[in-house]
Amino acid sequence: MRLSGKAAIVTGGASGFGAGIVRRFILEGARVVIADINGDAAREMADELGDAALGLQVDVSSADDVETMVKSTLRSLGGIDILVNNAGVGHKPEPMETLSEEMFDRIFDVNIKAIYRTARQVVPIMKENGAGAILNIASTGGVSPRPNLTWYNASKGWVITATRSMAVELAASGVRVNALNPVAGETPMLKTFMGEDTPEIRAKFLASIPIGRFSTPEDMGAAACFLCSDDASMITGVALEVDGGRCI
């Protein structure tokens, strides 16, 4: 029960890594807003998890949606102790010069600008409380980039740098900011990254991970719980690799 009494928001919380984080947070005693662009999935998951969960339809590329999410959380949970910026998008592998501007803008809006939007809404609340934990989900792609995913890799490199800068600026206010760098996992984004889901391509991916398996939602939930708990009270500005050794 390391998160007992804590109120949390997890964006992109209805599937993949986000769902793993939500489930672990609730297991550890938190009350959680599951914010997802798929509102039906968010509400279904909240119904499954009981009174400790609230499902909201939220498009993090919309400033109005983010503001409404924060107001709903304050109204329902009475505060915000933890914010997990997990929502993200990727693109299929292709040469950097052929990616459409529309897709580039989508990556920028969801992977980068959404963190700016949530910070504008949540940081003042945490500053006033003198405490809080923000966790940004980056990627091993921001540390050890793969070819043909350049603009996705770049967006996650931005997340890592933003995390460190946020940590330095907010430390005096009692707010910690960290990031997680997962390797590819069994999530809806896996097929996007691989371009095609075949045994041969999966084997090639797995060959780059010394532990020999993908990241799981449970792996991410465990790491997120630690970094957002008081057990990590002296840890801020860290981008922790949950990657089975891929970035070594």
Image: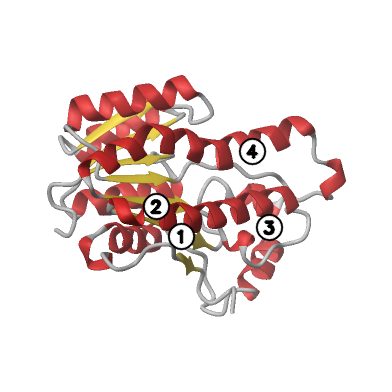
Label 4, label 2: how many angstroms apart (C-alpha)? Answer: 18 Å
Verify CB contact (< 8 Å) between mark 4 and mark 2: no
Q: Earlier in the sequence, mark 4 or mark 2?
A: 4
Q: Count residues near mark 2 (Cα–Cα under 10 Å), then give few for <14, some for 14-19, many for 20+.
A: many
Amino acid of disc 3:
Thr
Amino acid of disc 4:
Phe
Q: Earlier in the sequence, mark 3 or mark 4?
A: 4
User: Which residue is drawn at the image coordinates 27% and 24% (left, top)?
Assistant: 72
Q: Residue 210, how many percent across, how many down? A: 56, 80
User: Which residue is drawn at the image coordinates 69% and 69% (left, top)?
Assistant: 204
Q: Is residue 17 rendered to the left or right of residue 207?
A: left
Q: Is label 2 in a helix, a strand or a loop?
A: strand
Q: Is residue 149 rendered to the left or right of residue 110?
A: right
Q: Residue 161, how many percent across, how many down? A: 56, 56
Q: Is residue 48 rendered to the left or right of residue 143?
A: left
Q: Which residue is mark 4?
A: 108
When asked about the image quadrant of residue 65, the answer is top left
Label 3, label 1: how many angstroms apart (C-alpha)? Answer: 27 Å
Label 2, label 1: how many angstroms apart (C-alpha)? Answer: 7 Å
Verify CB contact (< 8 Å) between mark 2 and mark 1: yes
Q: Is label 3 in a helix, a strand or a loop?
A: loop
Check residue 198 in the rendering and tell me which mark sits there, or answer none: 3
Label 3, label 4: how many angstroms apart (C-alpha)? Answer: 29 Å
Amino acid of disc 2:
Leu
